[in-house]
Amino acid sequence: MGAVLQEGQQINVPNLEKEEIKKVDETYGYYKVLPKEGFYRLKLKLGLTQEELEALNPELKETGLKVGMILKTPQGNTNLAGVVNASYDGTSSDLKMKIKDYGTKHIAVMLPFRLNRVEFDTTADTKKSIKSDPYLNASLDFQSGVLMAIDSLKSLGLSLKVDVYDTKYEVSEVSRILAANDFSDVDAVIGPLTPSTFAKVASELQVNNVPVVSPIGLDLQLRSNVFQSRPKTELLKSRIVQFVKKDTLSNNVIIVADSKHVSIANELKRTFNQASIVYSRKNKKGQDENYVLVNDIVGSLKAGNNYVFLETTNAGFVSNVTSLLASVNNTIEPGQKNNDKKKITLVTTDMNDAFEGDQVSNEHLSKLNFHFAATSKWFDETENSFVKKYESMYNTTPNKRAVRGFDLTMDVVLRLVSSNSLYESVNDAPLTEYIESKFAYKKDIFGGYYNDSIYLVKHQNLRIVEVK
C-alpha cells in the first residue's frame, strides 16, 4: 500500500463486531502483567500461586503469561493499574514524616451551602436556616473539619491556598463556577458532595488532569481524575464474609433475615451451603412480624462456635434477635460437658441504623461479640487531641462529617506534599490512616481511583474496637 490512499483503493479492516468484548466482574480485582513478570514474581506481589492464578484464569494453562494481559484476582488483592509497591507490608505511612515539597498547594473545596436560602436578618433566623437545611448543615460540619485540618497542616510549615465554593446543590451553579474561575493550577478539588454536581466537576476538569476527590460518593463514574474516597458497599459485605469464611472449618453458620433480605440470605447460603436460614415470623397476610421465637433458632445452634448473620433494617427485629441470642449464648444442654457450650458470634453484611436504635441493647451486642465491617473506626473522644481542640474551638463534639472533613483534607494535602502528585501518591503511600479513616487507593482498570481500605470492628465490653 502506498503512503497516500488513492480513490477506489481497497483496504482491509478488522471486523470489530466479531471481537469478543469481555465484561468486568466487579466482585474480582484485576492485574495487568508487566514485562519480565513470571509466576514467581506474581506470587511475591499478589500472594497467589500459579495454580490459584490458573484457577481464576483458565486461559493461562494454554497461553502462559503474556505482557499486558489482564489477570482476574480476588477482590482487593491488587493495584488494578499493575503498579504495586513491592515494599508495602500492610502498615500505614505517616506522611507528616515524608514531606518534601513546602511550596504552596492550591486546593478547592466545593460544598452545597446554599447560602442564597439562608435568612441573615437575625441570629435566630440564621440558626433556624442552618437547622432546617440538611445540605447547609452537612456542609458546615464538613467544612469545620476542613478548617481544623488546614490549621494542623499550617502548623507543619505548609503553605496552602484554599478556595471554597458554594455549589448551591445545582449543576448550573457548578457550571458557572467552572466558567468563572481558572482551575488549571489547582492541585486537587475536594467535593462536591452530590453525585450530579461531582460528575460535572470531574468531567470538566478531566481535560487539565485535575484530581477531584469525592468525600462521600459511591458508584461514581471513575474518570481518570476521580478519587472515590469512600469504599464500595460491596467491599464491606465481602470483608465480613471472608472473615467468617476463614473461621468456619469447624464452626456453624446460621442466617437470620426478614423478607426484605431474602436475596442476601440466599447469597450467604450459597457461600455457606451448610448454613441454616431462619426468617422472621409472619402474620396471616404474609407480612413480617419482625420477631422470631427462641425455638426457631436454638435447633440450629451447635456445640462450639456459631456465627449468626443478622440481615435486616428493622430495629425491632434486631432487638428481638439479639435478646434471644444473648440469652442462649454460652449455654450447655442438660447432661453435656463444659466444652459443649454453644458460643455465638453475631455478624452482619450491612451495618445500618437498626443496629444502633434505642431498642437495641449494647450489652447484648457486646455479649455476642457483634462483628461488622465499617468505613471508619471508633476512637476515644476523651483522649483524642483533635476532639479536644475541636471542642475548644466550636464548643461541641465533632460529628462524623466533621471528622471526615479533617481526615480527607489531611490525606489529600499530605499526599500532595510528599509525592509529585496525587496520582503518584497512590503508589508512594499505599495506605494512610488518620482519626477514623484510612485510605488505600487502587486504580480502576478503565479509569480513576477508589479507596479499597476498610475496618473490621466488634463490640467488646460496651465499646467498639478494631479487630486486628
Image (spheres, grey):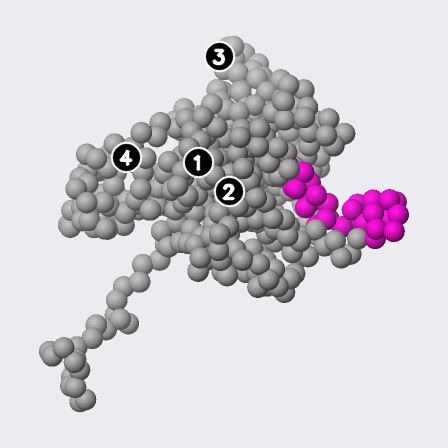
Amino acid of disc 1: Asp
Amino acid of disc 3: Asn
- How many neighbours does mark 1 have within 10 angstroms: few (below 14), some (14-19), or many (20 or more)? some
Residue 53: percent from left, percent from top = 25, 41
Q: Is residue 466 visible?
A: yes
Identify which residue, 95 or 31, lies in the foreground.
95
Picture layout, residue 367 above or below residue 234: above
Question: Is label 1 or label 4 in front?
Answer: 1
Residue designated by label 4:
45
> Rounded to the nearest whole Å, what is the CA distance between mark 4 and mark 3?
42 Å
For this orientation, the residue located farthest to the top is 338
Q: Earlier in the sequence, mark 4 or mark 3?
A: 4
Q: Quadrant of residue 458?
A: top right
Looking at the image, which residue is at 54% across and 46% down?
107
Looking at the image, which residue is at 37% across and 36% down?
428
**Numbered circle sitting on residue 21:** none
> Rounded to the nearest whole Å, what is the CA distance between mark 1 and mark 4?
30 Å
Residue designated by label 3:
339
Q: Quadrant of residue 174?
A: bottom right
Residue designated by label 2:
105
Does the magenta segment cover residue 299?
A: no
